[in-house]
Amino acid sequence: MAPTLVNVIYPAAASADFNMDYYLGTHMPLVQKNWAPHGLKSWNVALLDKETSGYHVQAVLVFETAEGFKAAMSEDKEIMPDVANFTSTKPSIWIGAVSGQWSA
């Protein structure tokens, strides 16, 4: 079964109040702690070029399965409420299975 990518994307408007130090130092370790038992394998965070993309920050989470992510979200009591601690902007969440991959 192919891994599932979950993209959590914050719109360009988030740049006005996004606390990247909190996001990387507190929020993402919380994500890792709570969601690893549901199949979270890795995460990456990118600061995007908001002028060309329309977005400010992107987190890419790799889960073993889409079901694992859905279970993580259904049991979530900490992750989504914590968003207010680093931004007032609501993220978009995109989910999809990996269809192809390459790495050097």
Image (spheres, rainbow, N blue to C red):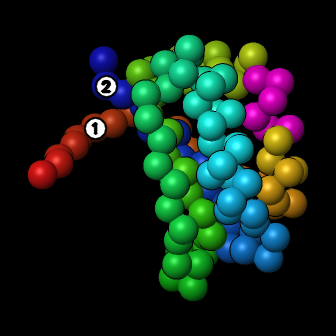
Q: Amino acid at mark 1?
A: Ser
Q: Name, please, the residue furthest toward the bottom.
A: 51
Question: Would residue 80 be counted in the magenta stretch?
Answer: yes
* Image-based side of 97 in relation to 91, left or right: left
User: What residue is shown at x 17% (from left), y 48% (from top)?
Assistant: 103
Q: Earlier in the sequence, mark 2 or mark 1?
A: 2
Label 1: how many Cα within 10 Å (few below 14, some 14–19, many 20+): few
Residue occupied by mark 2: 2
Q: Which mark is residue 99?
A: 1
Question: From the viewer's perspective, is residue 95 above or below residue 63?
Answer: below
Question: From the viewer's perspective, is residue 24 above or below residue 89?
Answer: above
Residues shaded magenta: 76-81
User: What residue is shown at x 28% (from left), y 38% (from top)?
Assistant: 99
User: What residue is shown at x 17% (from left), y 47% (from top)?
Assistant: 102
Q: Total marks drawn?
A: 2
Question: Would residue 64 be counted in the magenta stretch?
Answer: no
Q: CA distance from mark 2 to mark 1?
A: 7 Å
Q: Amino acid at mark 2?
A: Ala
From the image, which quarter does the N terminus lie in? top left
Q: Position of residue 48 (x, y in %)?
A: 53, 71
Q: Position of residue 90 (x, y in %)?
A: 79, 54
Splitting the image into 4 quarters, where does residue 18 fall? Answer: bottom right
* Viewer can see residue 42: yes
Splitting the image into 4 quarters, where does residue 74 fall? Answer: top right
Closer to us: 69 or 33? 33
Q: Position of residue 86 (x, y in %)?
A: 80, 56
Look at the numbered disc 1 and give the secondary structure of its residue. loop
Look at the numbered disc 2 and give the secondary structure of its residue. loop
Closer to us: 93 or 45? 45
* Image-based side of 85 in relation to 40, left or right: right
